[in-house]
Image: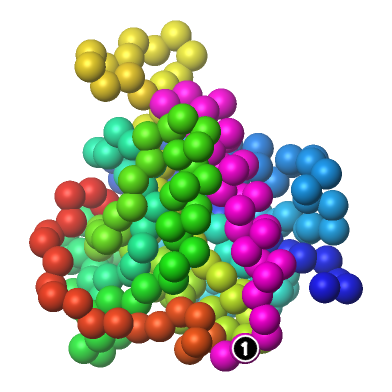
């Protein structure tokens, strides 16, 4: 590839119930990485406000501006103590929880009668990369029904030959803060541990993106139907 490989890293701002969102410092740290393996790679970042309107407006804008070859997204799953590599986006939107603009969805689905869209087989390689750092990482089939799932769906819709050819969404847990008391029996991850895992996944994504041929997105990421999943455990 003669032009620079462009990777877009995204996170979210605070939202109701989560005044501190650790995806922001994580994305900042990863974007600042300088490694030989990143020679010829342009890292960019974007932090989305936690609103449906912001995702719908800003995602097309940032994709048009940066023109990334791959998209690596992070979101907070406060009720999960481990890292979750999402394998799909569900056609579901919660009508219970308002977004950061105090807006509730007026419908339970995102698009028509589709059930789910898959990120693709590359998620298994991201999972392996994260686990090799020693972090507790697991594959997930349920990205919830809040903004993380919504962004995942919109991102997969934009995977195509003339846009990002790979996309992935990673749910991170609440992190241990300096001086904070860790929960008994379930110590929280530190930011440093998360950055290590994030770097490993980023490096894997770079390698995967370098191997991608220029072919229609339908051959790379497809919409598949599944039995209806259980209700989401997290936002």
Image vertical order of residue 86 relative to residue 132, above or below: below
Instruction: Give whichever of 111, 129 is nearer the camera.
Output: 129
Q: Position of residue 200 (x, y in %)?
A: 59, 43
Q: Residues within 10 Å of mark 1 (few under 14, many from 20)?
A: few
- Total marks placed: 1
Q: Position of residue 57 (x, y in %)?
A: 52, 74
Report the side of 145 relative to 36 (left or right).
left
Quick check: is 73 in the magenta stretch?
no
Q: Can residue 160 be seen in this snapshot?
A: yes
Image vertical order of residue 92 relative to residue 18, above or below: below
Q: In the rendered image, which quarter contains the N terminus?
A: bottom right
Task: Name the residue carrying label 1.
Answer: 215
* Residue interval drawn in magenta: 189-216
Element type where label 1 sits in the image = loop
Query: What residue is drawn where x is 83% and y is 66%?
Result: 4
Quick check: is 207 in the magenta stretch?
yes
Instruction: Give whichever of 104, 230 is nearer the camera.
Output: 230
Which of the 4 image quarters holds residue 34?
A: top right
Report the side of 191 relative to 8 (left or right).
left
Query: What residue is drawn where x is 36% and y is 63%?
Result: 87
Instruction: Give whichever of 145, 220 is nearer the camera.
Output: 220
Which of the 4 image quarters holds residue 2?
A: bottom right
Instruction: Give whichever of 67, 125 is nearer the camera.
Output: 125
Q: Position of residue 125 (x, y in %)?
A: 49, 55
Which of the 4 image quarters holds residue 50?
A: bottom left
In the image, farthest residue toward the right: 2
Query: What residue is drawn where x is 57% and y is 35%?
Result: 195
Magenta region's main secondary structure? helix
Report the side of 1 relative to 231 (left or right).
right
Q: Position of residue 64 (x, y in %)?
A: 68, 78
């Amino acid at each position: 590839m003669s032009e620079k490989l462009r990777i877009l890293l995204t996170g979210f701002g605070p939202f109701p119930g989560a005044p501190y969102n650790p995806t922001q410092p994580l994305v900042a740290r990863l974007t600042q990485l300088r490694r030989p393996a990143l020679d010829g790679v342009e890292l960019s970042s974007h932090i989305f406000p936690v609103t449906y309107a912001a995702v719908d407006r800003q995602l097309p804008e940032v994709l048009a501006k940066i023109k990334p070859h791959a998209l690596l997204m992070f979101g907070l799953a406060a009720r999960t103590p481990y890292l979750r590599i999402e394998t799909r986006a569900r056609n579901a939107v919660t009508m219970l929880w308002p977004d950061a603009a105090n807006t509730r969805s007026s419908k339970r689905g995102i698009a028509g009668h589709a059930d789910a869209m898959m990120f693709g087989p590359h998620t298994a390689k991201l999972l392996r990369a994260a686990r090799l750092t020693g972090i507790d990482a697991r594959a997930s089939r349920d990205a919830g029904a809040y903004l993380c799932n919504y962004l995942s769906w919109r991102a997969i819709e934009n995977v195509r030959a003339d846009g990002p050819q790979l996309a992935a969404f990673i749910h991170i847990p609440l992190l241990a803060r300096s001086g904070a008391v860790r929960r008994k029996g379930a110590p929280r991850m530190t930011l440093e541990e998360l950055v290590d895992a994030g770097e490993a996944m980023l490096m894997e994504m770079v390698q995967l993106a370098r191997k991608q041929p220029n072919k229609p997105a339908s051959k790379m990421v497809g919409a598949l139907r599944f039995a209806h999943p259980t209700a989401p455990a997290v936002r």
